[in-house]
Structures are given as structure tokens and as C-alpha cells.
Image: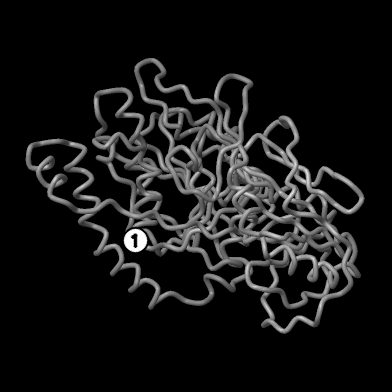
Amino acid sequence: MELIVIVIADTVEGSRPAVDTAWSARALGVPVRIVAPRGSEPWPVPEGVQWVFVDGSAGDAAALLMPPQGAILVLAPGERLVSDDWVAARARIEMWPASTPASMRSYEGVQQRLLVANPIAAPELMLEVRIERLAPLAPITTPQVEPLHVSRALVNGFDVAPLEPPALDEHLYIAASQGDPAAQELLAELCRIQVDRQRLAQVRERRSRSLWTDDEPLVTVRISTYNRGQLAVERSVASALRQTYRNIEVLVVGDCCDAATEAAMLAVDDPRVRFVNLAERGVYPDDARQRWLVAGTDPGNAGIALARGAWIAPCDDDDELTDDHVEVLLRAAQAGQYEMVYSQAQLESAPGQWRVVGDPSLREGGVAHGSVMFARDLRFMQYSPTCHRMGNPGDFTLWRRMSWAGVRMGFVPHITYVHYEEAREVAGALVIG
């Protein structure tokens, strides 16, 4: 179970003792975040500790840091964690089921200190660790770190560990030579890694620092659609135009759509909306499941090529962005100098049934397509039209390709996307979702 220690400083004056508390919590070996009001002194902190400055309630902002499958341990400034055996304490934490909270023993007795993402089960005592009040520790001498200033309760991104590509071994070559489509596709993906890494290095050499420092870069919200223009106008396009961040273009690319879709798009009275309709529809597999994995590849790649923004935010035509979607992802990407960043999303798994997806572990099914933003200069990597041969969806195949190439990725524990239940087939035509 993932654990994050949160030190909540509700007042500006509480920021200094919060550092002392954070210092003691570092012994656990888990991430530590100090949530404090804007205007607090950004005191130097040890490695593994980050500041999060907010405009509103520090407590409300701290809740956004909750891991999807884990817990946050809430501490107050002036407290410290004490243990006779930190190794045993860490091992105990790693054995907790994700749905089990724990209580921390303090000198005043047992207090519930862990808030968990899943429903509470029977409490469990963690006897190795206790909470005590502390006097100020010795002066901190570690180097100053750059704090993240946030608005609207935005939060830091977390580094996403790169995926390790499988080995190019003789078994893969043999399977590919014998006509195994999955092996052939994987082999092609693996052989492309070195070229991607070389091109990424070239991109970074040419890249301007303004990608991280420009306060108002143009962001392209890219939407692919096929013959459901009115739904796209009312849902995805409308949500893009409601963004708190205003310097955007909404690029809608039709997969050779009908006249009704084109008319619906051209009727949108906002100069930021641009509609491009491809002259030919993409060629997709006959099998419905395989077709769903790669449908929309052609308009998706066309949108990447046509985007004018420094950043690209994809959105499916039947889904919605939250109003702060672009603002949250853009600022997190700039603060962490990430080249690709993604967030949590609300996903409708059945009519009226919702769950939250997204965590710092890059995996298939764990990243909603529209919860992502990436730098436009990564456009040399595009959606694969043949990844269905491996049984993989086009969006995750692209994120995996980026990870294998070494793209710097970050995760933001904040919901910025609403993914509605998908209708795969309507009147024999594919519905992109």
C-alpha cells in the first residue's frame, strides 16, 4: 500500500515547525508533503520533502494528495514520528492491504491518524511508531528548493518510473519469424526504441526553455470524432471552452465525418474552435474488439501533426474535461519539467456507477486517454494503427512508447477528466471513445 506523509500547516506561522515535523517523518522512507498557505516562508527541506502552497484550506488541498490505492498519514506542525526500528515499521506499512487503515500510537493513547482511499476495515495498530510533540530541531542546512505555487488547490506532480522494455531474445525472434502477430508487433516496437531515444535527445537540444517558463503558452485540446458532432459539441467541445486557462485552441478532427457532424462543428461560435475533416476514413480491423483498440488513429495522428499549441491535450468526443483540466496539467508539467503528464479521472464503469482511475504506476487501464497532456515536440511519436495485433489499445501503446524512449513523465493526483461509459457500436458504425 502506498503511503504519503502530509504535514498540514494551516497558518503561515506553522510553516517553520512543519519543517521539523517533516524532517522526522523522512525516516519512514516515504514521500512527505508540507501543505501550507500561500505566503508561507519556503524553508529549506530535506530530500524527499516537497512544499505545496495553496490559496484555500490546507486541509482540503491535502485530500487531493491521497493515493488512489493507499493512504495519507496526517501530522500537525510540532509533532514528530519516533520509532525504535524504522525497518520494521516500513515493512509493516508495505504489508497493509489497501483497504485497511491503521492507527498511530501517541503519548496520549491511540489516535486515528491514517486516512485511506478505500472503505475502512478493522483498525490495526502500528506499535513500532509513535507520535510525540517536539521542540524545534537544530537549524536546517540543506539547500533551498524551489517551491510550487499553486492556485485553485493545484498540487505537485509525482515522477512516474519509466517502464522497462522486455528483452529482445531469441524466443521473440522465433515467434515473429513463425508468423505470430503479437510477436511481430512487439518486435517492431522494440526495434524502434533506439531511434526514438536519439530523436528525443535531438528534440531536447533544440527545445526552448520557454516550454517550462512561458506563463501562457498555447495549448491544443485535440478531439477526434466520427459522425456524432452534436454530442461532441455539447460535451467535449463545451468542456474545453469552459477552461479556466484561456489560451487554448480546440482542434476537432473528423474521421471522414458526415455533413451533419461538419455542420454541428461549424455552428460553434468561438474562434478558438477549428474543425478539420479527413477526406478518407481510417482503415481499421473488421473485428469489433480489435477495431475499438485502434479506432480514431488517423484523426488522432492528424491532430498531433496539425496542433499549433506548445502542449497537446487529447480528449475523446464523448467525454468531458474538468474546468481546471488544462491549468492543472500545464502547471504541474512546467513545475516538474515533465514532457508528459497525466491525472486521475472519473470513469463510468456502468450507467451511474463511477470510480476513480489513475495513479503513479504507468499501466494499461490506469491512464484515461483524456487525462494526459504532452509537449508538442514529441509529435514524432504517434498512435500505432497496428497495436491491436498485440491486444493493446492505441493510447496506452503511445504512452508506453514514450516511456521506453525516456520521456519525463509525471502524475497529478487530481481529477481532471470525466470518462463516460462507452457504446462500442451504433447502427454498425464504430463510436470512438
Q: Position of residue 100 (x, y in %)?
A: 68, 36
Q: Secondary structure at mark 1?
A: helix
Quarter of the image containing the N terminus? top right
Give the image quarter of residue 246.
Answer: bottom right
Quarter of the image containing the C terminus? top left
- For the point 19% across and 48% down, the residue is 187
Q: Which residue is mark 1?
A: 405
Q: Position of residue 288 (x, y in %)?
A: 31, 23
- For the point 72% across and 66% down, the residue is 51
Q: In this view of the protein, which residue sits in the foreground, 193 or 274? A: 193
Q: Residues within 10 Å of mark 1 (few under 14, many from 20)?
A: many
Q: In this view of the protein, which residue sits in the foreground, 239 or 405? A: 405
Q: Position of residue 295 (x, y in %)?
A: 34, 34
Q: Position of residue 22 (x, y in %)?
A: 75, 66
- In this view, the residue farthest toward the top is 427
Q: In this rendering, would 201 be left or right of 32?
A: left
User: Height in image: 57 above or below 333?
Assistant: above
User: Height in image: 22 above or below 284?
Assistant: below
User: Height in image: 4 above or below 97?
Assistant: below
* Residue type, mark 1 in image: Ala
User: Height in image: 2 above or below 145?
Assistant: above
- For the point 36% across and 49% down, the residue is 398
